[in-house]
Amino acid sequence: MARSTANRLFLALLICVAIFGLALLYWAALSGDTRSTAMPEKIPDGAWQATVPPLETAHLDLVRRAIGPDGLLAMHMERYRREVGRYPVRLEEIVRSEQETPGRATWGGPYLQNADLLNDPWGRRYQYCAPGVQNARGYDLWSVGPDGQDDTGDEIGNW
């Protein structure tokens, strides 16, 4: 009988922990925290608020995920190269239809269905150069960054 009571208490404790965890997740969602854990931070006026990474940090992360070595665009560029035998001359070639790319017997595209994915999080087209200057055996793919200007130091590239 004592063991049964201990099991019930343990089960009640587990339920309380689960409810508390769900409450934290709900609080994090309401506060806009997109991380897996909501770490409260004391702010000057004495109120408690969840820390949220700045929007620019999130944008930079999206760019790295898109054009990095394992990124979505990089994956489609490699598929294009394997099937056609070279990297595209222009970035838009990976979203064209077969009718727009005549004479390619091995062309299996479009390699990317949504042309909007060729834009960075700031709404600007990714820059592309093949063969690359930074990647002489491949291609250069980069975002001009939040300021929209090339060669200002805030570019994010696949190099």
Image (tube, rainbow, N blue to C red):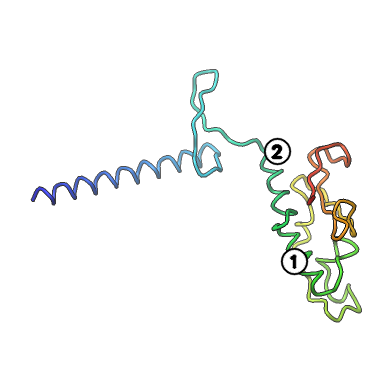
Other-residue count near label 2 (Cα within 10 Å), few / some / many at <14 / 14–19 / ≥20: few
Q: Residue at x 68, y 45 (%)?
A: 61
Horizontally, residue 129 falls left or right of residue 56, namely right
**Type of amino acid under label 2:** Glu
Q: Label 1 amino acid? A: Gln
Q: Is residue 78 above or below residue 37?
A: below
Is 93 rendered above or below residue 40?
Answer: below
Of circles 2 and 1, which is in front? 2
Q: Dot 1 corresponds to which residue? A: 113
Q: Is residue 5 left or right of residue 115?
A: left
- The x, y position of residue 58, in whole percent, is 66, 42
Q: Residues within 10 Å of mark 1 (few under 14, many from 20)?
A: few
Name the residue tied to disc 2: 56
Q: Picture coordinates of residue 130 (x, y %)?
A: 89, 59
* Cα separation between marks 2 and 1: 27 Å
x, y (%) of residue 22? 40, 45
Is 119 on the left-hand or right-hand side of 3?
right
Q: Helix, strand or loop at disc 2?
A: helix
Relative vertical location of residue 139 with respect to residue 85 in this rendering, above or below: above
- Percent x, y for residue 159? 80, 50
Q: Secondary structure at mark 1?
A: loop
Q: Residue at x 72, y 54 (%)?
A: 66
